[in-house]
Amino acid sequence: MERGDTERIEITISSRFENIELVQVIAEHLCENAGVDEDGSHWIGMAVREAVANAIKHGNKLDARKKVNATFELAGAELEIRISDEGEGFDPNNVSDPLNPQNLMKTSGRGIFYMKTFMDQVSYSFQPGGGTSLVMTKNLAKGSGIASTKA
Amino acid sequence: MKATTRTVENVEIISLQGKITIGAGDTQLREVISNSVNAGKTNILLDLSGVTTIDSSGIGELVGSYTTVTNRGGKLKLLHLPAKLNELLHVTQLITVFEVYENEREAVSSF
């Protein structure tokens, strides 16, 4: 992809866990086509997996009649991913820190943490009539999000 | 996800293959661990070399499995951690919870 080019991909799925991989694969292929290495593409794909899983489980409450929409916009090296559901939203300030020793042995609560680890920015917006949109951005010219953890 | 089980000395070695992800391998892992513990096998070594994909739900099930086994007086340890799973455990600091081995004989003798 040449500098200045833009790419936009959109997919809408019903709220079934087996559809998560469809969206993840699109993210990984988009990144690989943009020149991101395998590891970097994998971590972005995983952030997308976590976002879609949350939209299905916590947003749409596993109601297969409700949809999850994903859009990918790549402008130069800037990737923006938007995952939207039809749920009632939540308070991002009430999300617990999985690194807090009190939460370390919890069996859930790491999805948003992984998204924030792998992406540059993660934000939420809530629609007045219901529905949550998660927006994640990543500059693909940078390395993978967790390179600093490699000792 | 597929799980195959064998016993070496007094250690139940459970080899996991495939995906441990939400709605699929995560619940299977819980059942496999539950079956072993209910059969009185509480020294468990999870061979993860065949795990191709894991997500936060799968990580959560690993934590839940550790707690289940520990609460029954046993030990759960990990063998042959794939690189990406290793990184996921590092960033969440869970690597400090699990004993991880690269050599099966060494792992078995540690129980």
Image (spheres, coloured by chain):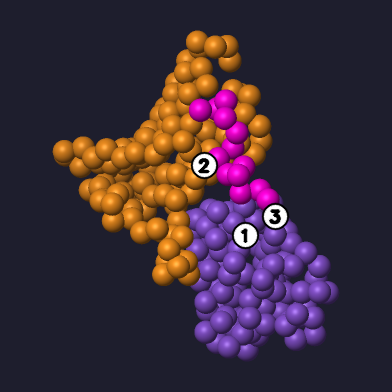
Residue B82 numbered tag: 3
Which amino acid, by three-letter code, is at mark 1? Met
Which amino acid, by three-letter code, is at mark 2? Phe
User: Relative to A95, is A41 on the left or the right?
Assistant: right
> Can you identify the residue that label 2 sits on?
A118
Q: Residue at x 59, y 37 (%)?
A: A144
Q: Residue A106 in the image: state x and y as whole percent.
A: 44, 68
Which amino acid, by three-letter code, is at mark 3? Pro
Sort mark 1 into few (<14), some (14-19) or many (20+) by Cα contacts within 10 Å. Answer: some
Circle 2: element type: helix
Q: Residue at x 52, y 77 (%)?
A: B67
Q: What chain does mark 1 sit on?
A: B
Q: Colour of chain A?
A: orange
Circle 1: element type: loop
Main SS class of the magenta portion in the image: loop
The reply to whether the magenta stretch includes residue A150 is yes
Q: What chain does mark 2 sit on?
A: A
Chain the render paints purple: B
Depicted B47 relative to depicted B82: above or below? below
Depicted B7 relative to depicted B25: above or below? below
Q: Residue at x 48, y 69 (%)?
A: A105
| Front disc: 1 or 3 | 3
Image quadrant where residue A35 sits: top right
Sort mark 2 into few (<14), some (14-19) or many (20+) by Cα contacts within 10 Å. Answer: many
Q: Residue A135 in the image: state x and y as whole percent.
A: 37, 35
| Front disc: 3 or 2 | 2
Depth order, front residue of A150/A50: A150
Residue B1 numbered tag: 1
Which segment is the magenta one? A139-151
